[in-house]
Image (cartoon, grey):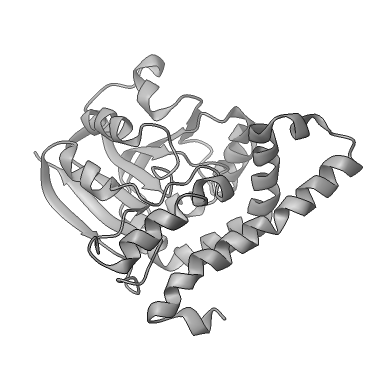
């Protein structure tokens, strides 16, 4: 079926396949909660969703990383330099790409992760990637960096990989991060974005799918014009953004990929 949806209008069916994968983990989550006598999440849908997504992501996360690896690897390897802000790294699934062998000029990485439940695994993965001496976890939101003493104009590289689609108030966060970049600093992005084919059927289909998509994918909103918000965040010396190499007018969950360089 995956091969069947590689090209043409049949690609419009792909989000339904992904939604079905997530839905499969609803009964699995119910079973695990009941058999572990953990009935609390049944009284709070938000808590239940957290358990549901955790079970689903155990299966889907590695597959998602594998699918994105061909794009994310060249984006980050040999591109991240100096002092870096790694926004929303989660448990650190991409940290191996920051390894000194690929990015020898990195001097410091701040992993901005507000979910403290992920910090232990994030630190462990930083050590596993050989970054234990340069990777520091900041347990705040991206909009609260001033609270931990980070100075504006001090960052060489900002990295956001599939995080701006799910954070609250993304436009405000993007504007708040821009001042932290040094002149000439780079923002590396790989993000879900609103389709650019605004007059085609896919635009309506994307909005329709997005009615349920955030519930099934932990708050991910596929209709955010994140690339446009980035362009409007401040002055850029150079912009190199594109859709995925195999993405077009039949892709319901397209990505913006590339680099923005702050004006010197």
Residue at the far bottom: name it: 4
- How many marks the image carries: the answer is 0
Indicate the position of residue 229 as horizontal and vertical percent values. Answer: 23, 42
Residue under the image location 30 percent in, 59 percent down = 195
Looking at the rendering, in which quadrant would you find the C terminus? top left
Q: Is residue 64 left or right of residue 85?
A: right
Residue 254 appears in view: no
Residue under the image location 91 percent in, 43 percent down = 35
Indicate the position of residue 217 as horizontal and vertical percent values. Answer: 55, 49
Looking at the rendering, in which quadrant would you find the N terminus? bottom right
Compared to 85, does 12 lie above or below?
below
Q: Nearer the viewer, residue 78 or 12?
A: 12
Compared to 97, does 122 lie above or below?
above
Indicate the position of residue 16 as horizontal and vertical percent values. Answer: 54, 65
Q: Nearer the viewer, residue 108 or 21?
A: 21
Residue 242 appears in view: yes
Residue under the image location 70 percent in, 41 percent down = 51
Q: Nearer the viewer, residue 162 or 105?
A: 162
Q: Nearer the viewer, residue 97 or 258?
A: 258
Compared to 141, does 80 lie above or below?
below
Q: Is residue 32 left or right of residue 104?
A: right
Q: Is residue 235 left or right of residue 16?
A: left
Residue under the image location 36 percent in, 31 percent down = 169
Indicate the position of residue 40 as horizontal and vertical percent values. Answer: 79, 29
């Amino acid at each position: 079926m995956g091969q069947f949806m590689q090209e043409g209008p049949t690609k419009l069916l792909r989000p339904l396949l992904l939604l079905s994968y997530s839905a499969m983990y609803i009964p699995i989550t119910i079973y695990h909660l009941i058999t572990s006598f953990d009935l609390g999440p049944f009284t709070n849908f938000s808590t239940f969703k957290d358990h549901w997504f955790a079970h689903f992501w155990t299966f889907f996360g590695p597959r998602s990383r594998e699918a994105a690896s061909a794009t994310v690897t060249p984006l980050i390897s040999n591109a991240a330099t100096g002092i870096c802000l790694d926004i929303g790294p989660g448990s650190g699934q991409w940290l191996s790409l920051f390894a000194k062998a690929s990015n020898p000029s990195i001097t410091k990485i701040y992993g901005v992760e507000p979910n403290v439940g992920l910090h232990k695994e994030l630190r462990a993965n930083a050590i596993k990637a050989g970054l234990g001496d340069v990777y520091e976890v900041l347990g705040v939101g991206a909009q609260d960096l001033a609270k931990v003493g980070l100075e504006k104009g001090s960052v060489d590289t900002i990295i956001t990989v599939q995080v701006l689609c799910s954070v609250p108030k993304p436009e405000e966060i993007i504007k708040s991060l821009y001042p932290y970049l040094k002149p000439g600093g780079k923002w590396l992005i790989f993000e879900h974005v609103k389709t650019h084919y605004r007059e085609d059927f896919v635009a309506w289909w994307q909005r329709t799918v997005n009615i349920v998509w955030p519930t099934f994918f932990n708050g991910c909103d596929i209709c955010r014009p994140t690339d446009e918000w980035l362009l409007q965040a401040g002055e850029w010396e150079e912009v190199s953004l594109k859709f995925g190499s195999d993405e077009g007018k039949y892709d319901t969950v397209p990505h913006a990929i590339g680099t923005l360089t702050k004006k010197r």
